[in-house]
Amino acid sequence: MEVKKSKKNNIISLKKNSKCPTCKKISREPFIPFCSKKCANLDLMKWLTDEHGLQIKSD
C-alpha cells in the first residue's frame, strides 16, 4: 500500500491579519491585537487616563 503525499496541508489559519488599533500596522505575536509593546502601552495609558471610554447607548 502506498501513501500519497499531498503538496500542501489544507489547514486554514483561524487568525486573520488584523491591523493594530493604535498605528494601523499589521498585528504581530505576542502583542495581538497590537503590533508592538509600544502600541500596547500607548493604548493602556489611554485607558488609564480616561481618554478611552465605554459608550453606552440608550434607547
Image (spheres, rainbow, N blue to C red):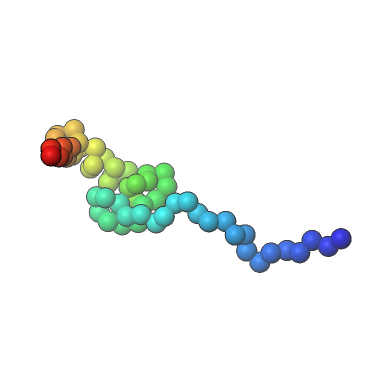
Residue at the farthest front position: 59
Residue 46 position in % (x across, y down):
18, 39
- Is residue 53 in view? no
At a point 23% along the width and 42% down the height, the residue shown is 43
Quarter holding the N terminus? Answer: bottom right
Residue 50 position in % (x across, y down):
14, 35
3 left or right, relative to 53:
right
Quarter holding the C terminus? Answer: top left
Residue 58 position in % (x across, y down):
12, 38
Figure check: 24 above or below 32 = below
Residue 45 appears in which quarter of the rendering?
top left
Residue 55 position in % (x across, y down):
15, 39
Q: Nearer the viewer, residue 39 or 3?
A: 3
At a point 42% along the width and 47% down the height, the residue shown is 29
At a point 14% along the width and 34% down the height, the residue shown is 49
At a point 35% along the width and 54% down the height, the residue shown is 18
